[in-house]
Amino acid sequence: MDPRDTVFITAAALGRRIAGGAPLSVLAVRNPRLPEHATAPRIPGAVDIDLPGELAAPGGGTRGSRPLPTIEALQRDAIRWGLRPEVPVVLYDHDRCLTAARGWWVLRWAGLAQVLLLDGGFPAWTAAGLPVATIPGAPPPGAVTLSPGHMPVLDADAAAAMARDGVLLDTRIRGNYIGGAVAPGQPPRGHIPGSISAPAADALTEAGTFLDAETLRHLFGALGADGARPLGVTCGAGISAAHGVAALASIGVTAAMFPGSWSAWSADPARPVAVGGRPG
C-alpha cells in the first residue's frame, strides 16, 4: 500500500465512503465551547473534539503548554466520540490539517491503527461541492480500548540528543525559530541547538493540501530527513510537529515527536537556546 494512503484521505474518497454507508467515524477538531462553532458548517455526522481540552492535558512549566492527555481521559472521550477499534477514523479541521494532525498523532499514539487526515481539511471538502451540515454528530457510545506508546516520543533530553546525533526538525514558522530579544520575565525565543528549521506550511500546496510524495521527499531529503538517520520533530507545543510527523509518514519515513516542544524546553532555564537562522 502507498504510505500516503495510510495517512491521508481525499475529500472525494471520503465523500464516496460516507455516501456508500461505510462504517466511519469523522472527527472535527475545533472548539465546541465557542458558540459560533456550534452552528458553523461541518461534514455531516462529524463529532466535535476540542484540541486543548481533549487532545492535551493541562500544561505548565517544563511539561509544556500541551502535554499528552492521560490515556484514561482519552479513552473516556474516545468512547463518547463513538470510536470503535475496527472502524476507521477521519479527522479534519478548517486550517490545512495544522491542528487536526494533533488528533491524528494522539489517536495513533493511543493504539488506533486506522486513523486518517482529510487532505486539505474542510476547505477541500467544500471545494469538492460535497454536502455540509450545521448540527454536530451524536453517535452512540463507542467501545474502544486505548493504550499509550504506539508512536515514538521524545522528552527534552532525547530531543537534545536527536539534534546532536540525528536530525531534529522544527516546524514552527521561521520567525519563531530565529528568535531574538524578549521582554523581561518572558521565556526565551529561539530554537533547540542543532535543530533545523522546517516550517509545517512548507509541506503544503497553495490550496492547503499536502505536496505530492516526490516533492515531499525532495523537501525533507534536503534537510537530511530521509530516514537514514534517527529523526525527530519539534514545534511550539506539539501541534505543528504532529503535522510534520504525518507528512513524513506519508512518504514512509518514521519520526519521533517532542510533545512539550519549545514551550517545555524554554521553561527550563538550564536549557541552552540558539538564536538565528542556523541550527547552532
Image (cartoon, helix red, strand yellow):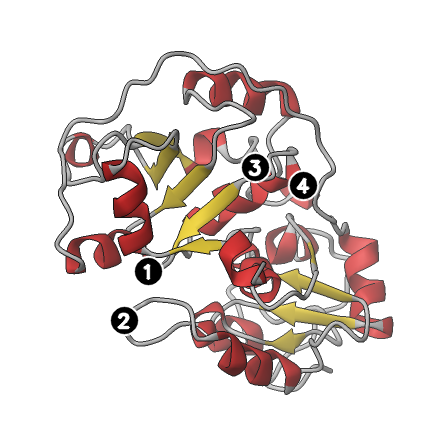
**Crowd around label 4: few <14 · some 14–19 · many ≥20 (10 Å):** many
| In-front residue for pair 102/90 | 90
Q: Which residue is mark 1?
A: 120
Task: Give the quadrant of the N terminus.
Answer: bottom right
Of pointers 1 and 4, the one earlier in the residue sequence: 4
Q: Position of residue 164 (x, y in %)?
A: 84, 73
Q: Which residue is mark 3?
A: 107
Look at the picture and state if 141 lies above or below 269. above
- Going by the numbered disc 2, the residue's amino acid type is Ala
Look at the picture and state if 80 lies above or below 227. above
- Going by the numbered disc 3, the residue's amino acid type is Leu
The residue that appears at 58% across and 85% down in the rendered structure is: 218
- Going by the numbered disc 4, the residue's amino acid type is Arg
- Going by the numbered disc 1, the residue's amino acid type is Gly
- State which quadrant residue 262 falls in: bottom right
Q: Which residue is mark 4?
A: 63
Horizontal side of 46 relative to 257 (left or right) equals left
The residue that appears at 70% across and 60% down in the rendered structure is: 255
The reply to whether discs 4 and 3 touch (Cβ–Cβ < 8 Å) is: no
Q: Position of residue 169 (x, y in %)?
A: 65, 70
Horizontal side of 178 relative to 25 (left or right) equals right
Of pointers 4 and 3, the one earlier in the residue sequence: 4
**Crowd around label 2: few <14 · some 14–19 · many ≥20 (10 Å):** few
Look at the picture and state if 204 lies above or below 95. below
Of pointers 4 and 2, the one earlier in the residue sequence: 4
Distance between the Cα atoms at labels 2 and 3?
A: 26 Å
